[in-house]
Image (spheres, rainbow, N blue to C red):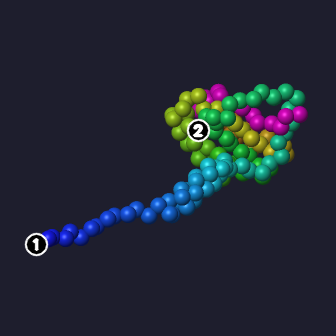
Amino acid sequence: MRLVRPRKRFIVPLNSMSDVAFLLLIFIMLVSLINYRKEVKIEYPEAATAQKTSEDKNLEIWIDQAGALYLDGNRCDLKAIENGIIDAYQQAPATRIHIIADRNTPFKHIDQVLKVLQLLQYRVVSFVVKDA
């Protein structure tokens, strides 16, 4: 008496593996190209001399012509800017504050931010200008 075993072969279909790999590659390339930095449209003031700073470890405070404040591209008020500066300092004490104001912004709006920085005794501050 002869016993016949049924053959159970498991075959992995490799025909579509190249398609999946190609789509995954396209997805990774597109995600890596997205720029997550938010910018406020302003007209930069000009300066005769300028000094470049490193781009990492920066906290950007934007001020437009109307005096609206933005912290890293998100609209906020003075209290939120104060909290953002405190949080940034606690995470990395070497964080540089960049104040980016429109050329036609009245100084009273910039002075509000400077008073917050003075109150916090924050000394690593840069004013961003357009290179002349």
Front-most of residues 122 and 88: 88
Which residue position is annotated with label 1?
Answer: 1
Start-end of magenta stretch = 120-132
Taking the magenta stretch, the answer to whether it contains residue 123 is yes
- Position of residue 2 in the picture relative to residue 22 (left or right): left
Q: Main secondary structure of the magenta part?
A: loop
Establish if 34 lies above or below 132.
Answer: below
Residue at 86 percent across and 36 percent down: it is 46
Image quadrant in which you'd find residue 13: bottom left
57 and 85: which is toward the camera: 57
Q: Nearer the viewer, residue 74 or 120?
A: 74
| Dot 1 amino acid type | Met
Q: Give the quarter of the image for residue 30.
A: bottom right
Residue 62 picture location, percent across and down: 71, 45
Q: Position of residue 127 (x, y in %)?
A: 75, 34
Residue 30 in view (yes/no): yes
Q: Which mark is residue 85?
A: 2
The answer to whether the residue labelled 2 contacts the one labelled 1, judged by CB atoms less than 8 Å apart, is: no
Q: Position of residue 26 (x, y in %)?
A: 61, 56
Q: Is 54 on the left-hand or right-hand side of 65?
A: left
Q: Residue visible at 56% across and 42% down?
A: 83
